[in-house]
Image (spheres, rainbow, N blue to C red):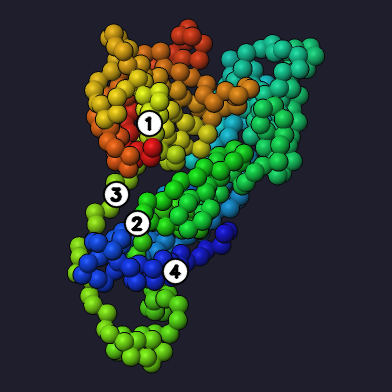
Amino acid sequence: MRKTRTLLMTLLSLTCVMSACGSDDAADSGPACVETICTPGESVCLDNVAATCSDDGKQWLATDCGAEQGCIAGSCTNRDARCVGATNQSFCVEGNVRARITCTDNGTAVTSTNCDLSCAGGACREAPCEAGTTVCGFRSIAICQENGVSWTHVECEANEVCSSGECVTETCVPLSRGCKDDTTVQNCNADGTGFVETVCAEDESCIESTGQCEKNLCSPPTDTDGNDNTDGADADATGGADGEDGPPREEDTYEPPELEPLDTAFVNVNGEKIDFTSNKGANYVVADQDLRITMDKGQTKIEISISPIEEFDVGVFASSEASDVSVRIFYHDGSPLVGMAQFRYQSVDYLMDLESFQAKGGRVKGTFSGTFTEDGGATTIPFEGGQFDVKRNL
C-alpha cells in the first residue's frame, strides 16, 4: 500500500470482456465499460496519495506519500517538520500560551495565529478554564489545572488519537485509502477513529491502491513493455487461447457511455476559499423530508440540512423571508471539539438556491451564502460564493 504500484484490473477486465464488451447487444447484457479512465499524464492528489495517469489512459500509477511528505498538485512534497503525521491539525506553540500554528496544504506549510486569550489543545480559547476540563488535540490532551488558569498537555502514543477527552487506539491510519471489497470503497476518516464507506456504481469497481471507484475498462491496461495485463496465455489468431480454436472476437460496436460528472463543492469562509475534497454527496431522509448535503476537507466540513422539503422540489430559500422550509448550515473549522459535538458553527442567516434535486443516483446542485456563529449571534463569520454539484446517494 505504501509503494508505487500499477493498478491492475485483470479480473474486472475479463468480466467486462465476457459480459458487455465487444458485443452487439452490449446494452442489454449489463453495465457498459469505457476505453479509458483518465487523461494520459494527468496528475492528481487522492488525500495523501499522488496518482499519475498512464500513457494508455487505462490506469492510475499511485504513490503513497507517507508520513514525511504530503501530496500537492499530484506530487509528493516534503512536509514542514512540525507537521509530520499531523495533516490539517493545529498546535499551541510551546512556551507561548497565546501562539497557535495550523498545518495546511497537507502538512507542507503552516500558518500562525496569535490568540487573544490563550491557546489550548490546538485552539484559541477563553481563559481562565474550569479545573479538570479536558480538550482534544489530534494526538494529545489538554487538561485545565487546579488553579483554573493554565493547561497541562499529555501526548498520546504514536498509534493513538484523542477522542472525547482521552487517548484511544486509532482504528486506522488517518486518511489512508483502500477497499472493503471489489465494489465498496473503505477510506479512513481524518482523525483515525473510523472508516467512511462508499458503494461503487454498477459499472464501477473499487481500486485498492487509490481507494476510489473507477469505471470498468473494456480491455485491460498495458504494462511498461506494451503487453496487456490479462491473466493466461495470449489468444491466437483465431481467437482461441493456448492453441485452441475459437471464434474471433468482434470489434466493439457501441458508443462508450458519457462519464458521470465529478462532484464539486466549495465556499469562501471569512474571505478564504475552501475546496472540499471528500465526503461530497447528498442524502434524503424520507421520514423527516430532510435533504442533507455534506462536504469535507480533512477535519474541515460543512453539512446543509433543508427540511421539510418534498422530494425533487427546488427553489430559493432565505432566512429573511417567511417559509415552511428551514435551512440549517453547519460548519467546523477542524479545531478540537468538546463532548459529542460535530460542528463548531451554525448559520444565523442564509440565502440558498437549490437548483436541482434529482432522484437517487442523480445530481443535487445549488448555491449558498450567509453568516456563521458559535455564540448565538454575538459574533459572526461571513460565508459566500458557496456552490455544490454532488451525487444523490440515498
Local secondary structure at mark 1: strand
Q: Residue at x 61, y 47 (%)?
A: 173
State the residue lying farthest toward the bottom. Answer: 243
Residue corresponding to mark 3: 260
Residue corresponding to mark 2: 203
In front of the other: 356 or 271: 356
Which mark is first along the chain, 1 or 2?
Answer: 2
Which mark is first along the chain, 3 or 1?
Answer: 3
Residue 372 in picture, x, y percent from top left:
43, 17
* Amino acid beneath label 4: Leu
Residue 252 in picture, x, y percent from top left:
23, 71
Residue corresponding to mark 1: 284
Q: How far apart are the two marked residues, 2 and 3, measured between alpha carbons?
A: 11 Å
As drawn, the label of residue 238 is none
Q: How far apart are the two marked residues, 1 and 3, measured between alpha carbons?
A: 20 Å
Local secondary structure at mark 2: loop
Local secondary structure at mark 4: helix
Quadrant the N terminus occupies: bottom right
Relative horizontal placement of residue 139, taking residue 365 as reference (left or right): right
Among the 4 quarters of the image, the one containing residue 278 = top left
Residue 1 appears in the figure? yes
Q: How crowded is mark 3: few (under 14 residues within 10 Å), some or many (20 or more)?
A: few
* Amino acid beneath label 3: Glu
Local secondary structure at mark 3: loop
In front of the other: 389 or 97: 389
Q: Which residue is drawn at 61% across and 17% down?
A: 125
Which mark is first along the chain, 4 or 2?
Answer: 4
Residue corresponding to mark 4: 11
